[in-house]
Amino acid sequence: MKARVFVSLKKTVLDPQGQTIRSALAGRGYETIADVRQGKIFEIELSAETDRDQAHQQLEEIARDVLANPVIEDYRVEMLD
């Protein structure tokens, strides 16, 4: 079983790397790009015998406690199969 955890800065938190990317895109002629927010993706493989609901609950815990800083970041867990 595979899963992905997406972590990104909350909309209320300044994203200087995203702003730099947006400026670089504008400099290359991509004027229609209004905003860029950068983040992280974690691809996680779980053992085959893992219960799907238990795995999702466990990954929510891991995302909240280890992968993301819930003060400034949002996260989303996506089960792939």
Image: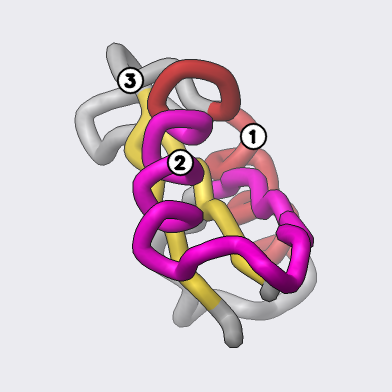
On the image, the x and y values in percent for residue 17 come to 64, 34
Instruction: Identify the element where label 1 is drawn.
Output: helix
Query: Which amino acid, by three-letter code, is at mark 1?
Result: Gln
Question: Is-magenta flag for residue 50?
Answer: yes
Question: Is-magenta flag for residue 69?
Answer: no
Query: Which amino acid, by three-letter code, is at mark 3?
Result: Pro
The magenta stretch spans which residues? 38-63
Residue matched to label 1: 17
Q: Crowdedness of circle 1 by 10 Å Cα count: few (<14), some, many (20+)?
A: few
Residue matched to label 3: 70
Q: CA distance from mark 3 to mark 2?
A: 16 Å
Instruction: Identify the element where label 3 is drawn.
Output: loop
Residue at point 51%, 30% (across, down): 62
Residue at point 34%, 38% (across, down): 74
Whether tag 3 and tag 2 are in contact, CB under 8 A, the answer is no
User: Does residue 71 sit above or below 8 in this rendering?
Assistant: above
Query: Which amino acid, by three-letter code, is at mark 2?
Result: Gln
Q: Quadrant of residue 61?
A: top left
Q: Is residue 55 left or right of residue 27?
A: left
Residue matched to label 2: 58
On the image, the x and y values in percent for residue 2 come to 69, 71
On the image, the x and y values in percent for residue 43 come to 74, 59
Q: Give the position of the N terminus as an image quadrant.
A: bottom right
